[in-house]
Amino acid sequence: MGGQVATSRRGWAWALAVALVAAGAGSAGAASTSAQASTVSPLRHAIVFTRFLPGADTGKVYRIDAGGTAEHLIRSGVFDFALLSPDGTQFADAAWTSDGLGTTAIFNVDGSGYRLLPTTLNLPGGIWSAGETRIAAAAGDPQNPTPPVGIFSRRSSDGVGVIRLTDAGTRFDYPIESSPDGSKLLYFQPDAKNQTSDSAAQDLFAVGGDGRALTRLTPPGTTTAVVHSYDSVSWSPGGTQVAVAAAHGPFGDTTIHSVYIASADGSSFQRIGPQGDIWDAVWSPDGRWIAFSMASTATGGLFELYLMHPDGSGVRQLTPATGGLFSLHPTWSPDSSQLLFLRGGTSNVDLTDIWSINVDGSQLYQVTHQPAGYGTSQALAWLP
């Protein structure tokens, strides 16, 4: 199972992220525990998240209600950072069949209804695609990429209706995010021939939900990365553009990165905002802002969150560079008024807590008080 886990959201990316920060500076449950002494929080919507305690092989999924602080256990024994469906009714997790094939486990937002999708291919984990109607997953294991390799889509209801979306050849494809209307899928592919590792510099592609209309979005010579487990790229609300953190040359060999806006049809690719050690680009639901993390001399080499408009104007630092704390993984609330993110210190960079902040920089708030692994912006989710 170890090789299969390497293809999941718990792979190399989080370890790489925290290393750079340091260098720069199953069963459903009904129990709940108090996250902090206060019983009131500034959260305007309920949130869900997965927590992996140090050394644990499995994690637990929790819910915190709007305005509250109590952590309500949804489900324990998850293998990966559970992903909430776009309609907020289900989670997807990595799982394995009795035959040892990787597949997707799906369960309801209250922890009930746990089921495995049947499969004849090795498809560990996966992401929601075409809304909540399908799951897209990479076939096989990048450490042993035996055919078939590529991304396959199948119905989330019964695991059938399989469509092959990509053919990775001698490389390995990593599904990222479905477009808002479900018609396209973003994915990464290593830039170098015969490369399968998610730690390699990546090229960004979009492909139609039927496997057609394959489009390269990052021009040759410009690469991105499986940064913070896919936080380096996001769709615009209308699905016509993509924001991506990218660099000229191999992404990991330089700290000069930028946010680029790519047309979903591949017709344009424009740099916006500052150049620096930028690691993600997350578009707000209302389309007005792009949140990104950047480390600089001004932040003492620590990653902090910034905002800018999609034309690159209005750049401002959102989280304070104080107390030796770094901030990563911005996750927008449904009304674009707040963000969740992970914040921690360099004394133990693989352990963080969840924080929130208003879009105007007010009400910086610590949501959890149990340092652990909390995943990425895909795993930190607001309920509708």
Image (cartoon, rainbow, N blue to C red):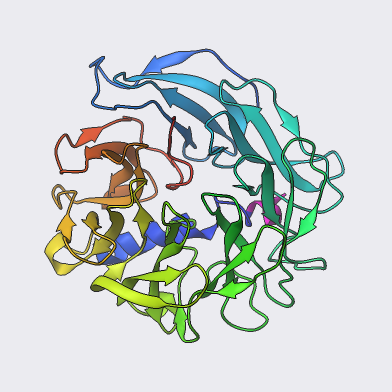
Can you tell which quarter of the image residue 308 is in?
A: bottom left
Residue at the spot x=21%, y=43% of the render?
A: 359
Most foreground residue, 135 or 95: 135
Most foreground residue, 310 or 116: 310
Q: Position of residue 27 (x, y in %)?
A: 65, 22
The relative height of residue 247 versus residue 326 in the rendered view (above or below) is: below
Residue at the spot x=80%, y=52% of the render?
A: 162
Residue at the spot x=46%, y=86% of the render?
A: 221
The quadrant of the image that shows the C terminus is top left
How many numbered discs, if any? 0
Most foreground residue, 185 or 319: 185
Q: Is 44 placed left or right of 236 in the picture? A: left
Most foreground residue, 99 or 179: 179
Q: Is 380 placed left or right of 195 in the picture? A: left
Residue at the spot x=61%, y=19% of the render?
A: 28
Q: Magenta stretch: dominant SS?
A: helix
Magenta segment includes 285: no
Q: Position of residue 286 (x, y in %)?
A: 33, 46
Q: Is 359 placed left or right of 2 in the picture? A: left
Span shown in magenta: 1-5
Q: Position of residue 88 (x, y in %)?
A: 52, 31
